[in-house]
Image (cartoon, rainbow, N blue to C red):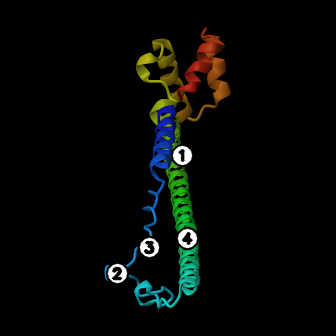
Amino acid sequence: MKRAVLLVMFLMLFTLAYAQAPPPPPATPLLPSEGGGTSDSSEIDLENASVETGASVDTSQQSVEQQVAEQEQQQFEEEKEEIKEQAARQKESSNFWIIFVVIVSVLAVSAGAFFFWRAKKKNNVQQGLQTLNPQNTQPQQAQINPQVLQLKNYIMQNLKQGFSREQIVSVLLQSGYSQQMIDEAFKYV
């Protein structure tokens, strides 16, 4: 029984150790398409920017830098949200496996306890049947004292002829048999 409990505990620990779902792959950064830019309409095409004066170049360059910074910030926020979603999915998957392992472990322990109880009950029933077996209720004739065996036969003959127990006992006592030997002979009748 102790071995079975230790085996079940080992299996539970082993299952818990390897039941964790593997972590999701790291998020890939958003890369621009191979055509030289993205299809996003908010990105500015620097080649077509007009350059009229030195001051307008500075302001347009600052606005372009500002737009690029805003776009990078937006991409960063999107990646951050995607990572949060992946973490939530991983946690849900991990919780599922933990619950699954616990349920399987409980079922395994319950099945083991049931079979142990059933085997023990079956063994108890077999022992009970052996004690109730009619062959076991009376000692075997080979173990009976020969004088007690003669008394038993004498008692059975007289009971068949209609004599009462008291009549038979009184005759045997008068013949010199002890009360203990008479009682032992009546056990086998």
Mark 2 residue crowding within 10 angstroms, few (<14) / some (14–19) / many (20+) = few
Q: Which residue is rendered at x = 53% and y = 77% of the image?
A: 68
Identified by mark 3, the residue type is: Leu
Query: Are the residues at dot 1 and dot 2 in contact (C-beta closer than 8 Å)?
Result: no
**How many dots with numbers?**
4
Question: Compared to 97, does 86 lie above or below?
Answer: below
Q: Can residue 129 be seen in the rendering of this structure? A: no
Q: Tell me where residue 57 appears, x and y as whole percent.
A: 53, 84
Q: Which residue is mark 4?
A: 76
Q: Secondary structure at mark 1?
A: helix
Q: Nearer the viewer, residue 116 or 18?
A: 18
Q: Secondary structure at mark 3?
A: loop
Q: Tell me where residue 41 appears, x and y as whole percent.
A: 47, 90
Question: Compared to 132, does 86 lie above or below?
Answer: below
Between the residue at mark 3 and the residue at mark 2, the CA separation in whole angstroms equals 14 Å
Q: Earlier in the sequence, mark 1 or mark 4?
A: 4
Label number found at residue 36: 2
Q: Earlier in the sequence, mark 1 or mark 3?
A: 3
Q: Which residue is mark 3?
A: 30
Between the residue at mark 1 and the residue at mark 4, the CA separation in whole angstroms equals 55 Å
Q: Earlier in the sequence, mark 2 or mark 4?
A: 2
Identified by mark 4, the residue type is: Phe
Q: Secondary structure at mark 2?
A: loop
Between the residue at mark 4 and the residue at mark 3, the CA separation in whole angstroms equals 10 Å
Mark 3 residue crowding within 10 angstroms, few (<14) / some (14–19) / many (20+) = few
